[in-house]
Image (cartoon, rainbow, N blue to C red):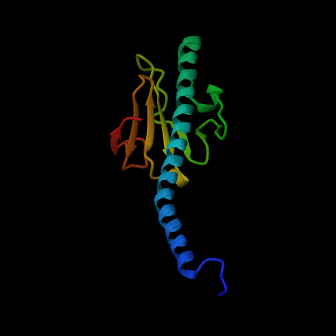
Amino acid sequence: MKQSTGFTLVELMVTVAVIAILASIAYPSYTSQVAKSRRADAQQFMMQMDTRQKQILIEQRAYATTPDALNVSSEGFTCNSSRCANSFYNITFNPAVDNTATPPSYTLCAIPQGAQASDGVLTLTSTGTKQRLTGTTSCAGGTAGTW
């Protein structure tokens, strides 16, 4: 009798089905972790901006009014006079820096875009309040949660 070697079609189909089931479980988890990583990058950059604002307040007795005046950098982020941005977040002062108030104040607002669009808007105020607003695409409204 001749011994055959190899796989039967049924064995291959079972293997493909098992791989498909594993992939359908792993992919959503992977995308969730990637979104958390991108959010953490934006949060870290916002904290850099916040730290630099506090240094400028001590040196100049007023906050910087534009993001590029902070002179901060992080891989992927570029800043100009209106915003700092990468492929996933636009970070602005919204509302604008208020140096006439006592004490002066500002709010950093990171609006997600592209693949992050449904992740929630991040805000950080000069008093240290950190919020993640879900259900909105602007710096106000939505449901507030913490970072």
- Count how many numbered circles sit on residues in the image: 0
Q: Residue 29 placed where, x, y %?
A: 47, 52
Q: Quadrant of the C terminus?
A: top left
Left or right: residue 53 compared with residue 75: left
Against 111, is 65 above or below?
A: above
Identity of the residue drawn at 40% across and 16% down: 102
Q: In the displayed orientation, state which residue is furthest to the left.
A: 143
Query: Residue 141's image quarter?
Result: top left
Left or right: residue 114 compared with residue 74: left
Q: Residue 105 placed where, x, y %?
A: 44, 23
Query: Residue 4's image quarter?
Result: bottom right
Viewer-proximal residue among 105 and 21: 21
Viewer-proximal residue among 143 and 140: 143
Against 39, is 63 above or below?
A: above
Query: Residue 57's image quarter?
Result: top right
Q: Residue 66 placed where, x, y %?
A: 58, 31
Identity of the residue drawn at 59% across and 12% down: 59
Q: In the displayed orientation, state which residue is furthest to the front.
A: 1
Viewer-proximal residue among 67 and 18: 18
Q: In the displayed orientation, state which residue is furthest to the bottom.
A: 1
Identity of the residue drawn at 53% across and 66% down: 19
Against 45, is 34 above or below?
A: below
Against 32, is 125 above or below?
A: above
Q: Residue 142 placed where, x, y %?
A: 34, 45
Identity of the residue drawn at 52% across and 52% down: 30
Q: Quadrant of the N terminus?
A: bottom right
